[in-house]
Amino acid sequence: MELTSRQEKIVEIVKNNGPITGEQIADQLSLTRATLRPDLAILTMAGYLDARPRVGYFYTGKSGTQLLADKVKHITVNDYQSRPVVVQQSITIYDAICAMFLEDVGTLFVVDTDTTLVGVLSRKDLLRASLGKQALESMPVSIIMTRMPNITVCKKEDLIIEVANKLIDKQIDGLPIVVEVDRGSGYEVVGRITKTNITALLVDLANDEMI
Ligand code: ADP
C-alpha cells in the first residue's frame, strides 16, 4: 500500500511522539480531527499504527514487508481456490487423459463410488503410463494413481502459506481441499488449490487488490 504524503507525515509524528491522541496529531498538522479521521483509520487498518483507548496512537514499528507478511499469514485456502475435477477409479487411463484435456486441469482427483477420495493423477502419471506398451483403453486409473493414505490434503480453513509450504516440500502442483466424512475415516473433495491460485495471490498482493 502506498501512503499519501499526509499519511506519511502522520506516521512520522506518531513515530516521534507516540502515544499521541488524534487531537494532538491534528494540532501538529494544523488540521481538524475530523479531516484526519479517514487517514488514521487507514493507517490503523493497514497496521502502521495501533490505537489504544484513552492512550492514543502509537507506531507499531512494522516495515512494509512485515505488514505484508502479516497479511499473507492470515489468508486461507477458502480465499483462493478452484473447482476440483474428479474422476471415478474405474475409468480407463485413456479416458483420464481425455478428461484432463477437456477440463483443462493438471491434476485429477480419483474417487470411489461413494465419492470418497482414493487417488491423485498428475500429468506425468498419465504420460508415464502412455510410454509403456500398456492398453490405455482398458486399464483403470487405479493401477497408476498415487493412492490414499499417501495423498497430501488441506482444508478450507487452512492457511494458504501452509499449502505453499506443502507444495514445495512434496514437489507437487496442487492439493485437494477436503472435508472429513464417515467420522474421519475418509475425505470428500470439495475444492482444489494449485500453484496457479498462489500465483494469483501474488498478483493480487502486488496490485494491493487482496480480498
Ligand atoms: P507432475 O507429475 O505432472 O509434474 P505433480 O508434481 O503434481 O505433477 O505430481 C508428482 C507426483 O506426485 C505424481 O505421481 C502425482 O500422482 C503425485 N501427487 C500429485 N498431487 C499429490 C498430492 N496432493 N498428494 C500426494 N501425491 C500427489
Image: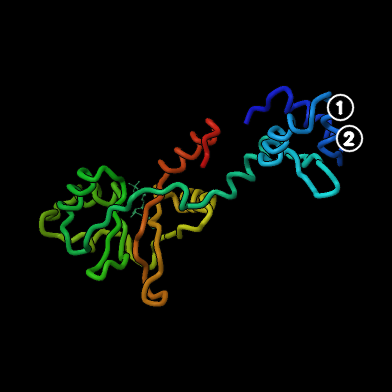
* Dots 1, 2 in contact, CB < 8 A: yes
Which amino acid type is shown beneath numbered disc 2?
Answer: Asn
Q: Which mark is residue 206?
A: none
Q: Residues within 10 Å of mark 1 (few under 14, many from 20)?
A: few
Query: 170 or 23, which lies in front?
Result: 23
Residue 27, above or below 107: above
| 124 with respect to 158 (left or right) | left
Q: Secondary structure at mark 2?
A: helix
Query: 30 or 163, which lies in front?
Result: 30
- Position of residue 43 measured from the top left corner of the image (x, y, whole percent): 70, 36
Q: Secondary structure at mark 1?
A: helix
| 209 with respect to 111 (left or right) | right
Q: Quadrant of residue 199?
A: top left
Tag 2 residue: 17
- Gap in angstroms between the C-alphas marked 1 and 2: 11 Å
Q: Is residue 153 visible?
A: yes
Residue under the point 22% across and 69% down = 113
Tag 1 residue: 28
- Position of residue 58 measured from the top left corner of the image (x, y, whole percent): 81, 41
| 129 with respect to 177 (left or right) | left
Q: Earlier in the sequence, mark 1 or mark 2?
A: 2
Q: Residue furthest bottom?
A: 183
- Position of residue 116 measured from the top left corner of the image (x, y, whole percent): 30, 68
Residue under the point 23% across and 63% down = 142
Query: 131 or 111, which lies in front?
Result: 111
